[in-house]
Structures are given as structure tokens and as C-alpha cells.
Image (cartoon, grey):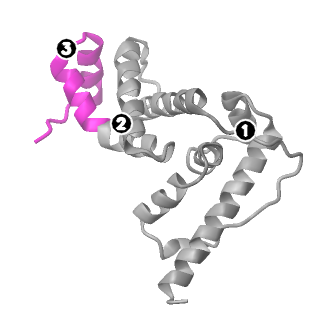
Amino acid sequence: MVQLYPEEELVAGCQKEKPTYQRALYRQYHRKMYGICLRYTDDAQDAQDILQEGFIKVFRSIKKFRSQGSLEGWIRRIMIHTAIEHYRRRSRYFMVDMEEAEKVELETEALTNLSRDEILHLIQQLPPGYRTVFNLYCIEGYSHREISLMLNISEGTSKSQLSRAKALLQKQIRHLNLRAAGC
């Protein structure tokens, strides 16, 4: 059983580099953070690598943590930035810049019929550029301007990547719904 410590005690112990608290912090947050890492890659091993690299950064930077926000939110930001760095290092895809991105709405009723795992699987099947922008915009709540700065792309490219990601997801969802209906 995982022993949970109050956030202040956990942070103080990690800032003093006490292994008991470092293990506790990892055990307390690794599953949630693994889920975040998994959204940015289609490979479980890559997600595990991002997770490990992210926690190394957490432990190296924990002395800078000031309790102005939640510890979980701080760790989450580190994981997202680590995933973006991982994407940049491994990116083999050229992002096409478009001035106007066509707006595509996902069918919400189709989404309600899908499980969390099915949705995650569909997101993981997106090309890396689409997947990264989709996650940052739709799940993490970043603006196109913020995404453009993080990924060194234009805002138009961010909008284009999001539009294409939504279109692909919509196509995949329709396909799943047709299969489920026996068509």
C-alpha cells in the first residue's frame, strides 16, 4: 500500500533529497503522469521514457517549487514540456503551414459511446504533429499562440494541425460507429 504524505511534507522531504519521500512522490503521481505521457506518443516504451525523464527533472527542480500552485499541476507541466522535447527530438514529420484552417466539429454523441481507452487509442494513432497539437489545445488548454511558441511553428500551422487532427478523429469515430452498427 502506498503511504500518502501531505503535500508540504512530501515537497520538503524531496527538497532534502530523502529517498523515502522521492519514492512516495513517484508512487503518488506516476500513474496520472504516465497517462499524460501516453497521450503524446503512440508507443508505451516512449511514454515510459518520457515519464522517467520527466521525474528526473522533477527531482532536480523540486527545490525551485514554491507552493503557489498545486504540486500535481507543477509536475504535470514538467511532463508536458518533457513530452514536447521528446517530440521535437524524434519529429520526422513536416508540418504544412496553412493560413486558414477549416473548422471541424467532433460528433459529441459518437464520443459518448466510446470508452476512455478507445479515445486514447484513436488519439495515439494520429500523426505525431497532429497528436501533439491536439493534446496541447484540446486537453491541456493551451492557445494556438502558446502552442506556436512551444513547437516553433506558426499559429496557422497550429490551427491547421488541430483541424486535421479533428478531421482524422472524426473519420475514425465514424468508422468505429459503422463497425459497431454492423455496417
Compared with 181, 155 (above or below) is above
Q: Is residue 86 magenta?
A: no
Q: Earlier in the sequence, mark 2 or mark 1?
A: 2
Q: Quadrant of residue 175?
A: bottom right
| Kind of residue at disc 3 | Lys
Q: Residue at x 60, y 29 (%)?
A: 88
* Label 3 crowd (10 A; few <14 / some 14-19 / many >=20): few
| Kind of residue at disc 2 | Gln
| Kind of residue at disc 1 | Phe
Q: Which residues are magenta?
A: 1-29
Taking 96 as reference, is 133 left or right? Answer: left
Question: In this figure, which residue is indicated by the disc labeled 1?
Answer: 94
x, y percent for residue 102 = 82, 59
Q: What separation in Å lies between label 3 and label 1 (alpha carbons)?
A: 44 Å
> Please, which residue is most extreme toward the right here?
99
Question: In this figure, which residue is indicated by the disc labeled 2?
Answer: 48
x, y percent for residue 106 = 66, 67
Residue 18, disc: 3
Taking 132 as reference, is 72 left or right? Answer: left
Q: Is residue 19 magenta?
A: yes
* Label 1 crowd (10 A; few <14 / some 14-19 / many >=20): few
Q: Are marks 3 and 2 in contact (CB under 8 Å)?
A: no
x, y percent for residue 82 = 49, 28
Q: Earlier in the sequence, mark 3 or mark 1?
A: 3
Q: Nearer the viewer, residue 113 or 97?
A: 97
Compared with 160, 109 (above or below) is below
Secondary structure of residue under mark 1: loop
Can you tell which of label 3 and label 2 is closer to the viewer?
A: 2
Q: Quadrant of the N terminus?
A: top left
Q: Residue at x 37, y 13 (%)?
A: 60
